[in-house]
């Protein structure tokens, strides 16, 4: 299913995902709920407004983990405001930020945040770089990270370089959601989408994008069909 009207919502019992937004070069923002656990994925610009529409401030304070697929601004643009809001609201419990190792955007945002607010922040922030595909769990949710293939322009002509980029498979109550982040077609993503209850796949390639940076609609659909249900997101508008 191609989705261009946001938010997009999917739910199976007490496992749900809400995609507030997913537009390339503008913003992404996703909330995953598993029982009482609340996790934010790729908080782009606008995440604070969307979370406040969705949750009570107390619930926002109880968010335990942020998952980042890669450092592009449309996926991390809301991290600063989210961390600052939690400080203003006097969060006490820790916040863990999981991100692909080498994603210097997240480390730079964190370092700047520490410089500005370090002594007056009410809660600990733990950076958790992901170095491999080992499965781990957070508050009853299992997380399997996997490498994907995403690139960016270097600024020199049409030259591109790969960026640290991962997708995540989230499992809870026997159900699985696969989110690929931004990626070109890759076998890893197909492997993890296979049999998932839901696959959320980007179809970001258009005439203006550099080949190999995103998936075409056809490629994303091909992967989506391996899952029980799929949404195509990050479609240029
Ligand atoms: Zn993007
Ligand atoms: Zn990207």
Image: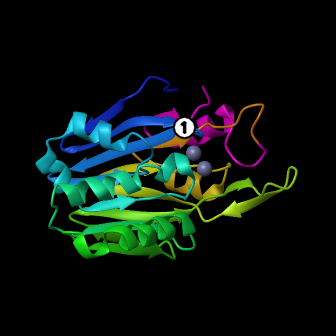
Residue 166 relative to residue 137: left or right: right
Mark 1 surroundings: few (<14), some (14-19) or many (≥20) residues within 10 A: some
- Residue at 30% of width from left, 57% of height from top? 84
Q: Quadrant of residue 8?
A: top left
- Residue at 54% of width from left, 64% of height from top? 105
Vertical position of residue 170 compared to residue 215: above or below: below
For the magenta stretch, what is the residue range? Answer: 210-237
- Residue at 54% of width from left, 50% of height from top? 73
- The answer, for residue 229, to whether it is visible in the render is no
- Residue at 43% of width from left, 35% of height from top? 21
Q: Position of residue 168 (x, y in %)?
A: 45, 58
Work out which residue is located at the far right of the displayed protein and give it.
157
Q: Quadrant of the C terminus?
A: top right
Q: How many marks?
A: 1
Residue 46 relative to residue 215: left or right: left
- The answer, for residue 22, to whether it is visible in the render is yes
Residue nearest the observer in this picture, 180 or 196: 180
Residue 225 in magenta stretch: yes
Q: Position of residue 40 (x, y in %)?
A: 33, 52
Residue 33 relative to residue 69: left or right: left
Mark 1 = which residue? 26
Residue nearest the observer in this picture, 86 or 214: 86
Residue 213 in magenta stretch: yes
């Amino acid at each position: 299913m191609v989705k261009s009207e946001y938010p997009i919502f999917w739910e199976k019992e007490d496992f749900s995902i809400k995609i507030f937004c997913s537009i390339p070069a503008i913003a992404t923002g996703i909330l995953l709920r598993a029982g009482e656990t609340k996790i934010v994925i790729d908080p782009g610009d606008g995440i604070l407004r969307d979370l406040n529409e969705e949750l009570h401030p107390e619930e926002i304070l109880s968010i335990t983990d942020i998952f980042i697929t890669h450092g592009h601004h449309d996926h991390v643009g809301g991290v600063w405001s989210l961390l600052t809001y939690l400080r203003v609201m006097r969060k006490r419990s820790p916040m863990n930020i999981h991100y692909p190792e080498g994603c210097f955007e997240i480390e730079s945002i964190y370092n700047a945040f520490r410089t500005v607010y370090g002594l007056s922040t009410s809660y600990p922030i733990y950076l958790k770089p992901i170095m491999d595909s080992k499965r781990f769990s957070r508050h009853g949710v299992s997380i399997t990270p996997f490498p994907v293939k995403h690139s960016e322009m270097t600024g020199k002509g049409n030259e591109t370089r790969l960026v640290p980029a991962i997708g995540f498979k989230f499992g809870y109550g026997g159900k699985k959601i696969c989110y690929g982040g931004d990626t070109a077609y890759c076998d890893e993503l197909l492997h993890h989408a296979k049999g998932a209850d839901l696959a959320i796949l980007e179809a970001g390639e258009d005439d203006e994008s550099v080949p190999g940076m995103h998936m075409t609609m056809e490629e994303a659909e091909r992967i989506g069909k391996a899952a029980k249900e799929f949404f195509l997101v990050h479609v240029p508008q």
